[in-house]
Image (cartoon, grey):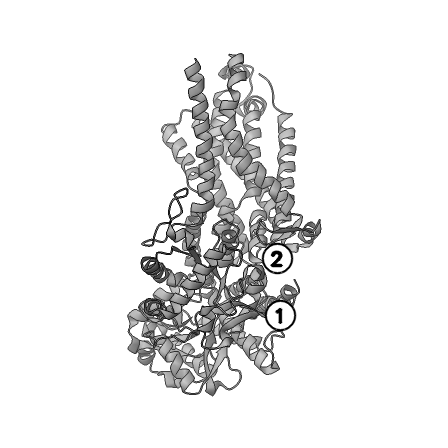
Amino acid sequence: MEKSIKSYFPIFLGPTFLAFIIGFIVPFLMGLYLSLCDFRTAADAKFIGLGNFVKAFQDGEFLHAFVFTALFTLTTVILINVLAFAVAMVLTNNVPGTNIFRTTFFMPNLIGGIVLGYIWQLVFNGILSRYDLALKISAKFGFWGLVVVICWQQIGYMMIIYIAGLQSIPSSLNEAAAIDGANSWQRLWSVTIPNMMPSITICLFLTLTNGFKLFDQNLSLTAGEPMKQTEMLALNIFNTFYSRVGYQGVGQAKAVIFFVLVVALGLIQLKMTRSREVQQ
Amino acid sequence: MKLKKTLSLVLAGALCVGALAGCGGGGTGGTGTPAPGGATPPPEGTPAGGSSAAGSVYYLNFKPEADAAWQELAAAYTAETGVEVKVQTAASGQYETTLMSEIAKTEAPTLFQVNGPVGLANWRDYCYDLTGSKVAGELSSDDFALMDGESMAGISYVIETYGIIVNTKLLGEAGYSLDDIKSFEDLKKVAEDITARKDELGFSAFTSAGMDGSSDWRFKTHLANLPIYFEYEADGIGDTDAIKGTYLDNYRAMWDLYINNCTCAPTLLSAKTGDDSVAEFVTEQAVFYQNGTWAYGDVADLGDENLGMLPIYLGVGDEANQGLCTGTENYWCVNSKAAPEDIQATLDFMYWCVTSETGLEYLCSGEHMGFVIPFKGNLESSNYLVNIANDYVSSGKTSVKWCFPTMPSEEWKNVLGSALTTYAADQTDANWETVRAAFVDNWAAEKAK
C-alpha cells in the first residue's frame, strides 16, 4: 500500500497542484510584487517601493473599515457559534422532524452571497419602508442587517459541524457523569464542551475568517452606505482599487496588509483553541 | 499492470489539459458572452481565416440603453464586411471597473470610451492618436475632439441634452402649462402646489430621486453640474483645482424641492432605482422627471404630445434665457496597445458607423439610439426630446455646458452621492455641511491626488 502511494502520488496530486499554482500561488506572488508598484493594469507596473503602504496606513477610511469589521466579526462569531451550538444540541435530542430541520437550517448556505444580499435588502427595505425608513440611511441598520444575513447563512453550516461533533462523544461519558450526580449544566461544561473542542476550533476558525473576509453580502446589502460607514475591509480594498485613478497600487498594498491580518488572527485562534482540545 | 499505469498517466494528463483549457477559456471567453445575434468568434485554434487577418473590433460600450442597437449594428457590419465586431456593455456605473479588468486581458477592447479630461488622465497611455484619421475628418467641428496636448486622444460620438422632462398632460390637469414655469421660483410654486393637492390630483410633482447606483448619477453628477457651471461662468474659468461652492445654497434648494415633492418619503430614496423613477413617470404618478434625451426610448410611450422639457432652473443668472444642459461625456478612444490590424479594423468600423447609411440610421434614428452625432453625416432626429432641445437652441436660449467631466474623480461623485442620501433622510444643517464638505473640501483633496 505504502509503496503504491509513493509511486502514484504525482498522478493524483499533480493536476490539482498545477491548478493551485496557476490559480493561487502565481496570482499571490504577483499581488505581492504589485503592492510595491504604481500600475493601472497588471501588465505594465512600475516599481516604487513602500509608498503604497504608507498611503494605506494614512487612510482614515481603511482604519474605520478595520474597526467596523472587527466589531462585526466579534458579534457574528459569538452569535453564530452560540446559536449553532444550541440548535445542534436540540437537533441531537431526538426531536421529531430532526432531518427536516437540519436540512432547512443548512439550506441558506447553498445561495450565493450576492443574491442573498439583494434578497435580504428587499426584505429589510420592505419592513423598514412601513416606518418610512430604509436600510442605507443608518449605519446601525446596516450593521445589524449584515449580522442577521450572515447569521442566517452560516448558522446552519456550523450546526452541521457541531452535530457531527456531538454525535462522536461516547454516550457512556455523559451517563457516567449523570450517575455521579452531575446536573445537565455541569455535564455540558465539564463533559460535552471539552470533548467538542475540535469542532469548536473549526467553527471558530471558519466564522472568524469569514467575518473578516466578508465581501459579497457587504457589497450587495449596503455597499458601504451611508457615507462608507458600513464599508468592511474587503469592500474598502475593492473600492480603493477600482474607483480612484492611480490608487490601484494602494488597493493592492491594503490587500497584502489584509492577508497578513487574517492569517495572523487565524493562527492565533487556532493555537489558543487547539491547546484546549482533549484526547479521549 | 503496464496498461493500468499507462491509462492512469493518460487520465491524469487529460485532467491537466482540462484544467489548463479551463483557465485559457476563462481568459478569453470570460471577456463576455458573444454578441447575441452577432457573429460568434471562431473557436481558438482554428486556422486564421480572412477575418482575423483583417483584424477584429471589440467595443466596450458605456450606454446600457443603447446595448441592443449596438449589437445589431455590429452584426450588420460583420454581415457587410466580414470583419468580426464584438460589443460588450458595462453595467450602469461599472464602466471604469469593467474597462480596467478588460484592458488587462489578451483580447482587450480595441474601442473604449473616456468621459473627458479626468477619464483621459487614467487612460492616457492607451489612447491612440486619432489625428488625421478618416473618422476624425468627419467631425463637424474640432471642438468635439478630446486633445491630450498635440495628440487627439478621443473624439466625441454623441451630443446629449438633459433637463426636466415634463408630462404636460398631467401638468395641465394640475392647472398649469409649461409657459407658467420660467424660473426656479415658478417651479417651486408649481411643485409645492401639486404636493399640497397630491391626494386630490392622484399624482406627485417629481419622480423619486432614487439614490441607488442606477439613478444617483442624475443628482451627484448631472444636477451637481449646475452649481459648478454657474460658478465657472461667474469666474470665467473652465476648470479649477479648488471649487468655492458659490451656488451651493441654490443646489440645496433644488435638492430640497426634489426630495420633498416626490412620490415617496425622502427617507426611502436610498432604495429607489432608475427603473422605479421611469416607471413612476410612465405610469403617470409624477409630472417631472430629471433626465435627458437618451431616455426618450423609456418615456416615448406617453406620446410625444404629452412630453415637454424644462431647463433645470437654479435661481441663478439670467433664468429667462437659460436653456437645457447640452454637452458630451462620451469620447471614443482607440486602444493604442492593440495589434495594428485591429486598430485599423477599429478605425474602419468607426468611419463606417458615422458615414454609411446603416450606421447613421442606427446612430441617429429614434427607433435605435436616437443620438445627435457631432459628425457631418448627422441625420434629422426622430427623437422628440432632441427636437425639443433643438427648439431651445434655435429660440436663442443659452445652453448650460456640461462641466462635470472636470469633476475630480469617481470617488468625489460617490462621496457626494452618499452625502446627498444622508441629507435626504435627515434634512439638518449638520448633514448639509457634510454635503458641502463633500463638494468643496473633497474637490480640492481629490484634485490634489
Please count the marks in the image. 2
Amino acid type at circle 1 is Val
- Relative to B401, residue A126 above or below: above
Label 1: how many Cα within 10 Å (few below 14, some 14–19, many 20+): some
- Relative to A77, residue A182 above or below: above
Q: Secondary structure at mark 1?
A: helix
Q: Same chain for labels 1 and 2? Say yes or no.
A: no
Q: Residue at x 35, y 83 (%)?
A: B177
Look at the image and tell me in which quarter the N terminus of chain B lies: top left
Residue B448, horizontal then vertical, whole percent:
66, 65
Amino acid type at circle 2 is Gly
Residue A46, horizontal then vertical, whole percent:
65, 51
Chain bearing tag 1 is B
Q: Which mark is residue A246?
A: 2
Label 2: how many Cα within 10 Å (few below 14, some 14–19, many 20+): some
Q: Residue at x 31, y 54 (%)?
A: B37
Q: Residue at x 49, y 42 (%)?
A: A150
- Relative to B336, residue B430 above or below: below
Q: CA distance from mark 1 to mark 2?
A: 22 Å
Look at the image and tell me in which quarter the C terminus of chain B lies: bottom right
